[in-house]
């Protein structure tokens, strides 16, 4: 950086470091990052740091939505580049074990072209926008901060893990509870976890509920007598497998209904959320009536994600 005479370009998924750029004078510094509401809530990127960088003269732009910018690239004039696992954060630069590769010549030139194409399409980040985001996320940042204080002394909460958990409740729109079938078979419950499915077998009520599941919807797993033991995000719509199909979660003589799920949390009985649920095989809990259930499970599994 000390040898950079003209333009410093940085692409970083998360930003919370300011000291590294504090002494950059009389040079064109461009910072490209990705911003999501959940990143700001959990502190993966810092509103205060972004404001300090803008005040220091750094040009900041951001992307949002999909595809997500997750790159960490540092470009020095048109001479060299570092492609690395390290975000522009204090933890990455001062604490983590990271790795990076220095490139020059044609490779650096290609990366500059890649950066500039993203830069042209990105939105400008200014102090007014940051102030608005600060107001819009204040309540959730306070809630998250209070939770962290309660967990003081435990391992740090992973921003990525917390972002996924909070993001699911923010964007899922539809929530469903699937009974784990433990009353009849603990093995079926284990298979659902290991295979990544929420499954049910005919005959069962509310088959129409499972037919409504789409990619991105939230799935909660309920073990009778213990509470909610798992939470995940549906990877796609329901599937229906006939008896004898070798890909079934569990063998049987009836049709198997199932939803592919990316499990974000799955806890043993001692860590289950003791929240009672509708005692049905598969049930829609998206309505206002179930707000308390959803809030309680969110806080419970978010707190356990540090363990």
Image: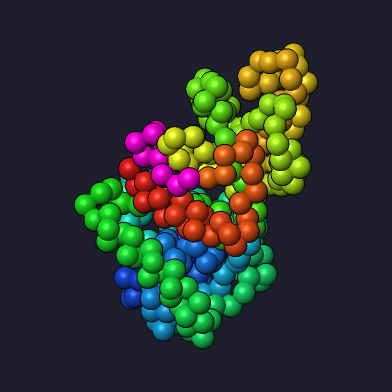
On whether residue 256 falls in the magenta region, the answer is: no
Quarter of the figure with the N terminus: bottom left
> In the figure, 222 relative to 181: above or below?
below
Q: Give how far across and how far down residue 122 sits, in percent.
A: 63, 70
Residue at image x 42%, y 62%? 42
Residue at image x 46%, y 51%? 297
> In the figure, 276 relative to 1: above or below?
above
Q: Would residue 116 appear left or right of 299 to someone viewing this image?
A: right
Q: Which span of residues is magenta-colored? A: 267-276
Q: Residue furthest left?
A: 153
Q: Would residue 244 appear left or right of 190 to someone viewing this image?
A: right
Q: Would residue 164 appear left or right of 63 to someone viewing this image?
A: left
> Toward the viewer: 72 or 240?
240
> Toward the viewer: 89 or 203?
203
Let me know if residue 198 appears in the view: yes
> In the figure, 178 relative to 55: above or below?
above
Residue at image x 33%, y 60%? 147
Let me know if residue 78 appears in the view: no
Q: Give how far across and how far down residue 214 sits, in percent.
A: 71, 47
Q: Main secondary structure of the magenta part?
A: loop
> Toward the viewer: 159 or 287?
287
Count of labels shown?
Answer: 0
Q: Give how far across and how far down residue 171 sits, in percent.
A: 61, 59
Corner quadrant of residue 63: bottom right
């Amino acid at each position: 950086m000390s040898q950079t005479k003209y333009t410093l370009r940085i692409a970083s998924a998360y930003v919370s470091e300011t000291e590294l750029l504090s002494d950059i004078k009389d040079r064109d510094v461009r910072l490209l990052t990705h911003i999501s509401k959940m990143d700001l809530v959990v502190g993966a990127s810092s509103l205060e740091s972004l404001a300090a960088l803008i005040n220091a003269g750094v040009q900041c732009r951001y992307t949002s939505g999909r595809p997500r910018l997750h790159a960490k690239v540092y470009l020095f004039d048109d001479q060299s580049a570092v492609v690395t696992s390290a975000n522009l954060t204090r933890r990455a630069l001062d604490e983590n074990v990271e790795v990076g590769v220095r490139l020059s010549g044609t490779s650096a030139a290609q990366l500059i072209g890649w950066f500039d194409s993203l830069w042209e399409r990105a939105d400008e980040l200014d102090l007014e926008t940051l102030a608005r985001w600060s107001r819009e996320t204040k309540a959730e940042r306070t809630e998250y901060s209070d939770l962290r204080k309660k967990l003081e002394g435990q391992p740090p909460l992973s921003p990525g893990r917390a972002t996924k958990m909070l993001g699911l409740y923010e964007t899922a729109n539809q929530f469903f509870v699937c009974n784990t079938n433990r009353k009849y078979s603990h093995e079926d419950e284990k298979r659902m976890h290991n295979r990544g499915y929420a499954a049910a077998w005919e005959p069962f009520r509310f088959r129409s509920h499972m037919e409504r599941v789409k990619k991105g919807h939230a799935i909660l797993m309920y073990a009778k007598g213990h509470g909610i033991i798992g939470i995940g995000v549906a990877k796609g719509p329901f599937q229906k497998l006939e008896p004898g199909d070798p890909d079934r979660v569990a063998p049987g003589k009836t049709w198997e209904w199932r939803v592919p799920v990316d499990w974000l949390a799955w806890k043993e009985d001692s860590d289950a959320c003791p929240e009672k649920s509708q005692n049905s095989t598969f049930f829609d809990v998206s309505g206002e009536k179930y707000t308390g259930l959803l809030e309680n499970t969110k806080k419970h599994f978010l707190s356990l994600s540090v363990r």
